[in-house]
Amino acid sequence: SSQYRLLLPDGTVRHVRTRAGFLQDVDDTPKMIGAEWDVTSDVLLNENLVHERQLSESKNAELETAKARIEHVALHDSLTGLPNRRYLDEMLAGAHDDRTALLHLDLDRFKHINDTLGHAAGDAMLMHASKVIKANVRAADFVAR
Protein backbone atom coordinates (compact mmCIF):
# COMPACT_ATOMS: atom_id res chain seq x y z
CA SER A 1 0.00 0.00 0.00
CA SER A 2 1.32 3.44 -0.90
CA GLN A 3 0.07 6.92 -1.47
CA TYR A 4 1.40 9.53 -3.85
CA ARG A 5 0.56 12.82 -5.50
CA LEU A 6 -0.15 13.32 -9.15
CA LEU A 7 0.40 16.66 -10.83
CA LEU A 8 -2.03 16.87 -13.72
CA PRO A 9 -1.27 18.88 -16.90
CA ASP A 10 -3.68 21.64 -15.79
CA GLY A 11 -1.71 22.07 -12.52
CA THR A 12 -4.25 20.25 -10.37
CA VAL A 13 -2.85 17.99 -7.69
CA ARG A 14 -4.58 14.69 -7.00
CA HIS A 15 -3.73 12.22 -4.27
CA VAL A 16 -3.86 8.54 -5.13
CA ARG A 17 -3.66 5.48 -2.89
CA THR A 18 -2.47 2.20 -4.37
CA ARG A 19 -2.70 -1.29 -3.01
CA ALA A 20 -1.11 -4.24 -4.76
CA GLY A 21 -0.38 -7.85 -4.06
CA PHE A 22 1.15 -10.91 -5.67
CA LEU A 23 -0.56 -14.23 -6.17
CA GLN A 24 -0.08 -17.37 -8.19
CA ASP A 25 -2.66 -18.72 -10.56
CA VAL A 26 -3.60 -22.40 -10.84
CA ASP A 27 -0.50 -23.29 -12.90
CA ASP A 28 1.83 -21.39 -10.45
CA THR A 29 2.30 -18.42 -12.76
CA PRO A 30 2.98 -15.30 -10.62
CA LYS A 31 0.41 -12.58 -11.06
CA MET A 32 0.05 -9.11 -9.64
CA ILE A 33 -3.27 -7.61 -8.70
CA GLY A 34 -3.89 -4.08 -7.51
CA ALA A 35 -6.22 -1.17 -7.21
CA GLU A 36 -5.85 2.60 -7.18
CA TRP A 37 -8.30 5.15 -5.94
CA ASP A 38 -8.42 8.91 -5.62
CA VAL A 39 -8.09 10.02 -2.01
CA THR A 40 -7.71 13.74 -2.69
CA SER A 41 -10.79 14.65 -0.66
CA ASP A 42 -9.53 12.56 2.29
CA VAL A 43 -6.10 14.22 2.17
CA LEU A 44 -7.60 17.72 1.95
CA LEU A 45 -9.99 16.97 4.79
CA ASN A 46 -7.12 15.67 6.93
CA GLU A 47 -5.00 18.75 6.15
CA ASN A 48 -7.95 20.96 7.08
CA LEU A 49 -8.47 19.05 10.34
CA VAL A 50 -4.78 19.44 11.24
CA HIS A 51 -4.96 23.17 10.50
CA GLU A 52 -8.16 23.61 12.52
CA ARG A 53 -6.69 21.64 15.45
CA GLN A 54 -3.61 23.88 15.44
CA LEU A 55 -5.84 26.94 15.28
CA SER A 56 -8.01 25.72 18.16
CA GLU A 57 -4.93 24.87 20.25
CA SER A 58 -3.58 28.36 19.60
CA LYS A 59 -6.91 29.96 20.55
CA ASN A 60 -7.10 27.77 23.65
CA ALA A 61 -3.61 28.92 24.70
CA GLU A 62 -4.69 32.54 24.18
CA LEU A 63 -7.81 31.94 26.29
CA GLU A 64 -5.78 30.32 29.07
CA THR A 65 -3.40 33.30 29.07
CA ALA A 66 -6.32 35.74 29.15
CA LYS A 67 -8.00 33.75 31.92
CA ALA A 68 -4.81 33.82 34.01
CA ARG A 69 -4.45 37.56 33.40
CA ILE A 70 -8.09 38.21 34.38
CA GLU A 71 -7.74 36.06 37.49
CA HIS A 72 -4.58 37.92 38.48
CA VAL A 73 -6.30 41.29 38.00
CA ALA A 74 -9.31 40.11 40.01
CA LEU A 75 -7.16 38.92 42.91
CA HIS A 76 -4.44 41.59 43.08
CA ASP A 77 -4.29 45.28 43.89
CA SER A 78 -3.47 47.23 40.73
CA LEU A 79 -1.31 49.77 42.55
CA THR A 80 0.90 47.59 44.75
CA GLY A 81 0.58 44.26 43.00
CA LEU A 82 -0.21 42.66 46.35
CA PRO A 83 -3.05 40.17 46.70
CA ASN A 84 -6.32 41.98 47.45
CA ARG A 85 -9.06 41.43 50.04
CA ARG A 86 -10.84 38.87 47.89
CA TYR A 87 -7.66 36.81 47.59
CA LEU A 88 -7.10 37.15 51.35
CA ASP A 89 -10.65 35.92 52.02
CA GLU A 90 -10.04 32.89 49.78
CA MET A 91 -6.76 32.13 51.55
CA LEU A 92 -8.37 32.40 54.98
CA ALA A 93 -11.31 30.23 53.92
CA GLY A 94 -8.88 27.55 52.77
CA ALA A 95 -6.62 27.76 55.83
CA HIS A 96 -7.15 24.55 57.76
CA ASP A 97 -4.07 25.03 59.90
CA ASP A 98 -4.55 25.86 63.57
CA ARG A 99 -1.46 28.07 63.41
CA THR A 100 -2.95 30.89 61.34
CA ALA A 101 -2.15 34.40 62.52
CA LEU A 102 -3.41 37.66 61.10
CA LEU A 103 -1.72 41.04 61.46
CA HIS A 104 -3.60 44.15 60.39
CA LEU A 105 -1.54 47.30 59.74
CA ASP A 106 -2.86 50.83 59.40
CA LEU A 107 -0.81 53.71 58.02
CA ASP A 108 -1.15 56.65 60.40
CA ARG A 109 -2.42 59.90 58.88
CA PHE A 110 -2.77 58.32 55.43
CA LYS A 111 -5.93 60.33 54.67
CA HIS A 112 -4.09 63.51 55.66
CA ILE A 113 -1.26 62.66 53.22
CA ASN A 114 -3.77 62.08 50.41
CA ASP A 115 -5.65 65.30 51.23
CA THR A 116 -2.61 67.56 51.60
CA LEU A 117 0.01 66.08 49.26
CA GLY A 118 -2.33 64.50 46.73
CA HIS A 119 -3.18 60.97 45.68
CA ALA A 120 0.11 60.51 43.85
CA ALA A 121 1.95 60.94 47.15
CA GLY A 122 -0.48 58.57 48.86
CA ASP A 123 0.04 56.02 46.10
CA ALA A 124 3.82 56.35 46.44
CA MET A 125 3.52 55.79 50.17
CA LEU A 126 1.37 52.67 49.67
CA MET A 127 3.81 51.26 47.11
CA HIS A 128 6.77 51.92 49.40
CA ALA A 129 5.00 50.40 52.42
CA SER A 130 4.05 47.30 50.44
CA LYS A 131 7.66 46.81 49.29
CA VAL A 132 9.00 47.23 52.84
CA ILE A 133 6.47 44.78 54.28
CA LYS A 134 7.01 42.23 51.51
CA ALA A 135 10.80 42.47 51.95
CA ASN A 136 10.51 41.74 55.67
CA VAL A 137 8.33 38.65 55.73
CA ARG A 138 9.10 35.04 54.96
CA ALA A 139 8.43 33.66 51.49
CA ALA A 140 5.72 31.42 52.96
CA ASP A 141 3.90 34.39 54.53
CA PHE A 142 0.94 35.99 52.80
CA VAL A 143 0.82 39.78 52.46
CA ALA A 144 -2.34 41.41 51.12
CA ARG A 145 -3.80 44.88 50.81
Image: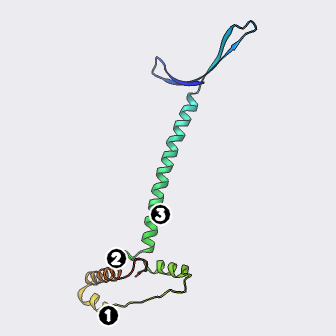
141 w.r.t. 53: above or below: below
**1 or 2: tag closer to the N-terminus:** 2
**3 or 2: tag closer to the N-terminus:** 3
**1 or 3: tag closer to the N-terminus:** 3
The amino acid marked with disc number 2 is Leu
Residue that badge 2 annotates: 79
Residue 35 at x, y percent in the picture: 64, 19
Residue 111 at x, y percent in the picture: 31, 91
Residue 92 at x, y percent in the picture: 51, 82
| In the foreground, 82 or 140 | 140
Q: Quadrant of residue 32?
A: top right
* Residue positioned 48% across, 23% down in the render: 12
Horizontal relation, residue 23 to residue 130: left or right: right
Gap in angstroms between the C-alphas marked 1 and 2: 19 Å
The amino acid marked with disc number 3 is Lys
Q: Quadrant of residue 104?
A: bottom left
Badge 1 marks a residue whose secondary structure is loop
Report if residue 15 is visible in the image.
no
* Residue positioned 49% across, 41% down in the render: 51
* Residue positioned 49% across, 45% down in the render: 54
Badge 2 marks a residue whose secondary structure is loop
Q: Are marks 3 and 2 in contact (CB under 8 Å)?
A: no
| In the foreground, 142 or 61 | 142
Crowdedness near tag 3: few (<14), some (14–19) or many (≥20) residues, C-alpha within 10 Å: few
Gap in angstroms between the C-alphas marked 3 and 2: 20 Å
Residue that badge 3 annotates: 67
Report if residue 127 is visible in the image.
yes
Residue that badge 1 annotates: 108
